[in-house]
Amino acid sequence: MALSSIENYSAVSRNSSPTSLWSLQKKILSLPKHQIPKCIADAVESTKNKKVPMEQHVETLTLQFNNFLSKQMNNDNTSEAVYTPATLELYDAIVWEFNAPFHWRIRPQQVEDFYRIGLMSSQRHCEVAVGTGLFLRQWATTKTRQPPKLEQVTLMDLSVSSLESCYNRLQEVDLFQHHVNVHKVQANILEPPPSHLCGTFDSVAANFLLHCLHGNSMQDKKAAIQSCATLLNPIHGVFFGSTILGKALDADAEAAGPYAISTNVVYNKLGIFGNRGDSFDDLATILKECFHSVAIWRIGYCAVWIARRPVGPNEQSLFTKYETILPPIE
């Protein structure tokens, strides 16, 4: 997919389609019953009632999902605490099938496009903040993609549960089971990465990472972006990712709707998120300081980007390419 076609993305309407609910139903109700809390199973089952307004379904699901995640935190306010085995079973459904389209106005298919670009020529890839490896798995099983050059994937996360879950799921995919070496590294991305990994990756992805880091603004998370830049090959390395912008949500609260706003507030209060001060402009500035070439877009209440050629320790950014597209919220 050409980069120019990504530039034409517009924000997702706040009135997400019934198709999104159908996808959520399929994702959750296909899981073994013992993996689904009854309150969530009942809430998802209730969305089959077409006589109930969409907004009421969104309210019910928001309440049940947020209560579920609150219990997983177990009074631990670190962002990695939420990634329990129970959460990871429902992670793709809650984060990407529900929260992303209904609250943050970004569709998972839009993130998939960046993997096709970022991994197009990559032999060594590092996935930072791994989740379940959803987009790596989807990329690996996409029939229309070119034969991959990928030889090695390094999974990097502070959460041991996430690392194990992602690794195990990747091993269920033929490409990663037989053709690509997969390694796990437990690390805090806010700290300098292990020296033997620096400068060794053709691509680094950090999706839905930055909004989970705690700080008063995006500037407090600059170290994470610098670490990702340090991991990249200085000549042809590509860094791509996405994050939820708390300031964008708050600034557009009426259009965002009460459930998006309340979910972001709850997540920040619990410690799952730390994004109330995160802005598009601050992120663009940091990327500009860390890379010679930056393309950044706004999709819904998220920022997505592709950055190339990290700035070396004794360099100043040449900043040869900078694009910013801010589609209006529908």
Image: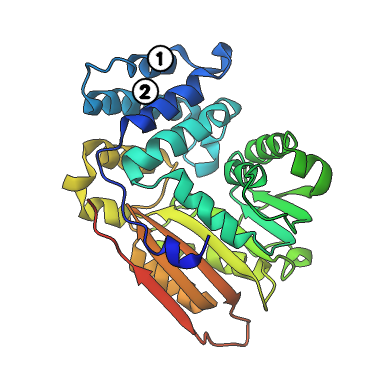
Mark 2 touches mark 1? (CB < 8 Å): yes
Count the labels in the image: 2
Q: In this image, 330 relative to 292: left or right? A: left
Q: Residue furthest front?
A: 144
Tell which of 246 and 22 is nearer to you.
Answer: 22
Instruction: Tell me where residue 284 sits by quadrant.
Output: bottom left
Q: Residue at x 70, y 72 (%)?
A: 233
Density class for disc 1 (Cα within 10 Å; few <14, some 14-19, many ≥20) is some
The amino acid type of the residue labelled 2 equals Gln
Q: Which residue is mark 1?
A: 39
Percent x, y of residue 256: 23, 45
Residue 190 shows in the view: no
Q: Residue at x 64, y 52 (%)?
A: 145
Q: Residue at x 66, y 39 (%)?
A: 166
Q: Which residue is mark 2?
A: 64
Q: In this image, 268 relative to 126: left or right? A: left
Q: Is residue 46 above or below residue 320?
A: above
Percent x, y of residue 136: 63, 46
Q: Residue at x 26, y 45 (%)?
A: 13
Tell which of 11 and 98 is nearer to you.
Answer: 11
Q: Earlier in the sequence, mark 2 or mark 1?
A: 1
Secondary element at image label 1? helix
Number of the label disc, if any, that sits on residue 166: none
The amino acid type of the residue labelled 1 equals Cys
Residue 102 shows in the view: yes
Q: Is residue 69 above or below residue 299?
A: above
State how far apart marks 2 and 1 are (Cα).
7 Å
